[in-house]
Each structure stands twice: as structure tokens, then as C-alpha cells.
Image: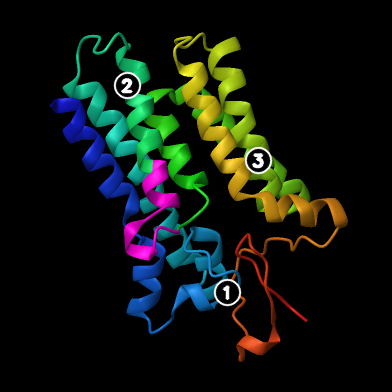
Amino acid sequence: MILVGLAIFAFFLGSIPFGMLFARARGIDIRAVGSGNIGATNVVRALGPKVGLTVFVLDVLKGYVPALLTKQVVTTQALGLEVQTLSMIMGVIAILGHMFSPFVGFKGGKGVATGFGAALGAIPGAALVGFAVISLTVAITRYVSLGSILAAISVPIFSILVFKDSSQLIPILVIMVLFIVWKHRANIERLRNGTESKFAFKKQIPDTQEDVKEDDDGIASPR
């Protein structure tokens, strides 16, 4: 019953659309801006870096809290799974809540911030490497989507090969990576054809929506 309760809590917490709520409080429908994505990147473009960072932190906590709470509540193996594995599972459930939120018609963000939080709670070493990967990639290329994909892929590699985390994590981490990459499929296509928009850490909302060229990563550039 404890695991069921944790799973329900993780999904509910993960499904809270903080980006949409913050934008709505300022009279903006974030789903009608840029890509319509509710994640922090699109919030930065619509509302500026201060609000975007707030949403990012909250989205990270959506994954971090369930993963960390599981470690505190579950002290022994359950269902044949180690505590670290159960912690990551709860984090992944929060990611799925973020991606398929019932509050947004079972749509949502791409799970990168929440995924970072989940990994930070369950496998902190690999999570910090992933954060370094995305930070370095965005600093060099200004492509958030590329950094997100590379960071997601790096987490299971470093978790298993470098930090020697539980081998039970492998299928869980693979599922997480596949979902995140799948959510970035449109970005991957634009990266391939050279039309992906670059990130600018500032408010970019135009005067009229007609002047926006949509970018599914949440960054819109003037036509």
C-alpha cells in the first residue's frame, strides 16, 4: 500500500502544470505562445528568466520529492526491487505525470527538468553529470533540445558505468530516456535540417502571435 500511495502522489505532483499556472496568473495562455509547451524554456520566452527559473525549480522538485521521499519511507527491498530502484521508479512516474498531465488534457512538457529532479533524488552523481552536459551543450550551441537529449542519454551511462548504481536501474533509465527523446522528436528533425531555434535567456514574446515562428522546444523566433 505504501508503494501505491507513493506512486499516486508522484503522478499527481508531476502532473501539476506550474508553467501554465504561472502564465495564467499573468493573463497569458502558455499553450498559445510559441510551441504551446508548458515547460520552463517556453515560460522564459513568454514571461522572462525570473519566472522561467521559478518554473524550472518547481518542475525539478516534482521529480526530486517523490524520489527522495521513497528513500525515506521505504527502507528495505520491496517486490524484489532495491530502494534506489524504487526511488527512480517513483521519479519516472512523476515524469510521466508531467508529460501526460490530466490537467492539460493528458499533454504536458518534455520531462527534462522533472527527469533531472528524479535522477537527483535517486542517483545524484549521474544527475549532476547530466546537468553539466546540458549546461555545456547549451553554452556552446544554444540548442536546449540537443543539450536535453545528450544529458538524458548520459545519465544511464554514467549511473551504471561510472557511479556503479544498481543494475536494476537499467530498464527504468532506458524508459526515461526513450520518453524524453520521443518528446523531442520534432526538435530532432529540425536539428537535422538546420531549422532549430537557438535559446536566448530573456523574454522574447512578440507583440502579436502572428509574428512568431513556432518552435516545439518552446523558443519562438521572429519570422
Q: Furthest residue to the left? A: 1
Q: Residue at x 77, y 50 (%)?
A: 141
Q: Furthest residue to the right? A: 193
Whether residues under marks 3 and 2 lie with C-beta atoms below 8 angstroms apart, the answer is no
Dot 3: what SS? helix
Q: Position of residue 78 (x, y in %)?
A: 24, 13
Asked whether 35 falls inside the magenta stretch, the response is no
Q: Position of residue 100 (x, y in %)?
A: 41, 52
Residue 200 location, quadrant = bottom right
Q: Residue at x 55, y 13 (%)?
A: 160
Q: Is residue 18 rendered to the left or right of residue 163? A: left
Q: Position of residue 47 (x, y in %)?
A: 49, 74
Q: Amino acid at mark 1?
A: Lys
The residue wearing badge 1 is 203
Which numbered marker is on residue 86?
Answer: 2
Q: Foreground residue, 219 or 12? A: 12
Dot 2: what SS? helix
The residue wearing badge 3 is 149
174 is higher (above) or lower (below) than 162: below
Q: Earlier in the sequence, mark 2 or mark 1?
A: 2
**Magenta range:** 95-107
